[in-house]
Image: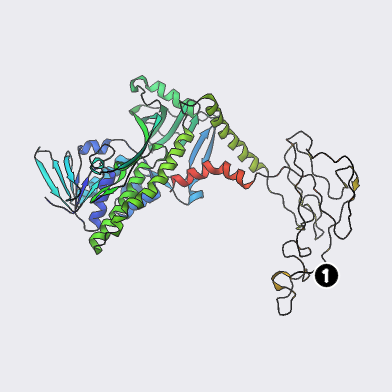
Amino acid sequence: MRTQVAIIGGGPAGLLLSHLLHLQGIDSVVLERRDRGYVERRQRAGMLEQGTTDVLRESGAGARLDREGLVHHGLELRFDGAGHRVPLTDLTGRTVTVYAQTEIVKDLVAKRFEDGGDVRFETEVLDLDASAPSVTFRGEDGVPRTLECDYIAGCDGFHGVSRPAVPELRTFSREYPFAWLGVLADVPPSTDELIYANHERGFALHSLRSPEVSRLYLQVAPDEDLGAWSDARIWDELAARFATDDGWELHEGPITDRSITPMRSFVAEPMRHDRLFLAGDAAHIVPPTGAKGLNLAVSDVIVLARALTERYANGSETLLDGYSDACLRRVWRAEHFSYWMTTLLHVDPEADAFARACSGRTWRTSRRRRRRRRRWPRTTSACRSPEHRRETRPSCSGGPVTPPVRRPGSPAAPAPAAASRTAAGRARPARPCPAPTSAPPSGRPPDGAGRPGGPPAAPGRSAGSSRRSGGPAGPRPRRRRPVRTSPRGSAPSRRPAPSAPVARSVTAATPSPRPSARPSARPSRRQRAVVNAPIAATAAGLCA
């Protein structure tokens, strides 16, 4: 027997690769150890990224996906008794679709048989040779046969025979101290979007398979006894971990399937040896928290299909030579995201009380900071003079200044015309806003305004005035740090006053800026980045 590409494994990766090669006129044979019924029934991932759905539609295998798939534009992170929605589409411009892997396998198997493809179930691979590419297998009749080919694609999963055939393989792995108890229930979902819940008793996930079927997960120990979890215990634990302060209710119903899934991270590199190429779970495993497993496998298949198409169309092996590096770049990004999201949302049973307290405070602090940022809008003013505070000085145009929005309980800002006081307690009269000077000072006018042959000065501003501030050009005076305001209900904190007044030379023409009490400043850019990092990273990672 001979073919162009021998594909070991009849899961979604192997079937999709065979389908994509068929569209390019490349022959392939798929060898699957399990029977067709088992392959179409086993429960696996159910959330597809937009890149995966686009490939299925463009290849002609997405008709049922468009009819039955549930498109989501966001997800919910739930902790501390409250939910926080992450708008994926608003943040990334992409969507995710809930469509079970079992349905994808059914669609691809039907498509391959419809196109006359060679898919062999209940076929055990006995040996393979990557140098002189060939695969020895035993079919349903029990007779060993050899399939000669040009290339071999190992899509047979973590426990397959393809990866052990790669010599000098480097592996990286991590076993997590928890697992998932997954249940499939015949009950309408309690939510329209996925819910990731962080609770002191462990992680919980509310997913869905269809408008009538719910998929739910609980964090348990890796050696948990499945028989110890009755239906009532599962629903009680789910209700406790999903509970919110607003009375959200979890719909309960009959559980039709349950299993415990261990969690691990694993990467094997390189993903190519001679004419053998690894794809999907045969080369990498990610924890299911980030929903990256199936989508990574589809990404590998797309890269491999393009490389094989280039090889048979133009005779070039450039893409084949770069297959491993191209795939591993994306794999490691997904591994890092999945590891980060897993450790963020789960409760580590090996962590001490200090680590757990720090983890809980991180969630609560982020929540308070987001509320504070929404409550304190930025103040604005018409006056742009650098020598005057926007909150306490009238505008240069003579119009009123927008009053600053201050936090309830914080000390009010001084009135615009009220006299301020120096650090030594001496009264100081309020300074009016200086009028722009008519004569240009020494220095180069901005943008050549007012110079011979240059553009004319802007209306309402002299040739030597500053474009930004409207005042005289030249070096801007040093702006002093504003006085910090203490927490609500307390007096503003100031630096200790000097023991004796210090004489200063003050002229009316160049008044020195003085700090004035002002409301507490908004969180800095770095603080906002720290607060938004989990949500932004989650959105970007799920839609990558």
Q: Which of 155 and 379 is in front in this view?
A: 155
In the picture, measured across the screen, residue 140 lies left or right of residue 363, that is left
Q: Position of residue 280 (x, y in %)?
A: 31, 44
In the picture, measured across the screen, residue 360 lies left or right of residue 266, that is right
Tell me the residue that label 1 is attached to.
Answer: 438
Q: How many marks?
A: 1
**Numbered disc 1: secondary structure:** loop
Amino acid under label 1?
Ser
Which quadrant of the structure image shows residue 104?
A: top left
Q: Nearer the viewer, residue 319 or 54?
A: 319
- Can residue 196 be seen here? The reply is no
Q: Where is residue 14 in the image (x, y as percent from the top left)?
A: 25, 46
Q: Which residue is drawn at 43% across and 33% down?
A: 205
Which quadrant of the structure image shows residue 433?
A: bottom right
Q: Residue at x 30, y 54 (%)?
A: 59
Q: Residue at x 10, y 44 (%)?
A: 145
Q: Position of residue 99 (x, y in %)?
A: 35, 42
Question: Can you name the residue that lies furthest to the top here?
Answer: 228
Q: Is residue 342 above or below residue 508?
A: above
Q: Position of residue 392 (x, y in %)?
A: 80, 50
- Can residue 153 be seen here? The reply is yes
Question: Can you name the residue that lies furthest to the bottom here?
Answer: 453
